[in-house]
Image (cartoon, helix red, strand yellow):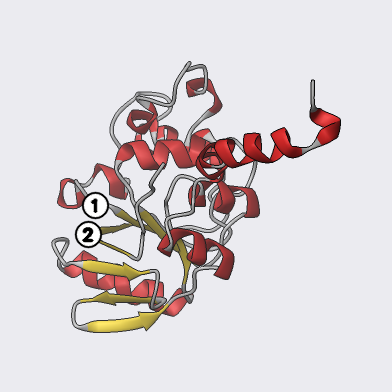
Amino acid sequence: MSLAKITAITGRAVNVPGNDIDTDRIIPARFMKCVTFDGLGEFLFNDVRKDPKTGAITNHSLNDPRFKGATILLSGANFGCGSSREHAPQAIQKYGFRAIVAENFAEIFFGNCTTLGIPCATASREDIAKIAAAVEKNPQAEVVVDVAKQEIRFAGQTVKCEVRAAARDALVNGRWDAIGELLDGVGAMKATAAKLPYLAA
């Protein structure tokens, strides 16, 4: 199974500000009854994108038509905290996001994103604010999250970011799906097992 080498993500960005945005806010629990993850993107940030009493659309940034089609999500500190539900990064991916930039990430959420091939890049609050200001000024601005070089380029500016070493190595070398790697090794495992006398029938 050959995986894509994810060295950089290029696209438009949208800012979803706030700290401690947890997985229940990302995808409320009542939408986790699905058999597959297909369709989860429709309910991304559902309870803040709609008024809980009336169902009316709010002024959440994902409801802003200027940012429709954005593939890079900007946010604050401790993004993805709370429960370890895999549905959260799945909903983010199914919505169309291909990279996330935040001040830092909850550990399990970070790992779940990496195994989906979604780079989670950390940057300073000040630099994220610069990117957010640039895309607010021009929502069509191209943003590049360079995983290999650990930098973000936008509107003629470049800021530093960090993608944790193990995750960066997995992404840029196309080894981000651990299950896929195990499946790739089935033949080698069977060959080794056949040589082990204590496993002989």
Q: In front here: 111 or 139?
A: 111
Asked whether the beta carbons under mark 2 and mark 1 sit within 8 Å of each other, the answer is yes
Q: Which residue is mark 1?
A: 70
Q: Could you tell me which residue is drawn at 17 percent across and 61 percent down?
A: 139
Question: CA separation, marks 2 and 1?
Answer: 7 Å
Query: Which image quarter holds the N terminus?
Result: top left
Q: Residue 14 sits in which quadrant?
A: bottom left
Q: In front here: 56 or 131?
A: 131
Q: In front here: 194 or 189?
A: 194
- Residue 175, given in percent of the width and then of the height, sits at 48, 54
Q: Residue 132 sits in which quadrant?
A: bottom left
Q: Could you tell me which residue is drawn at 31 percent across and 72 percent down?
A: 131
Q: Amino acid at mark 2?
A: Gly
- Residue 11, given in percent of the width and then of the height, sits at 22, 59
Q: Please state if 151 lies on the left or on the right of 57 as rendered.
A: right
Position of 9 relative to 159 (above/below): above
Q: Please state if 199 lies on the left or on the right of 67 as rendered.
A: right
- Residue 118, given in percent of the width and then of the height, sits at 42, 52
* Disc 2: CA contacts within 10 A as few (<14), some (14-19) or many (>=20): some
Q: Amino acid at mark 1?
A: Ala
Position of 147 relative to 19 (above/below): below
- Residue 85, given in percent of the width and then of the height, sits at 59, 35
Q: Which residue is mark 2?
A: 11
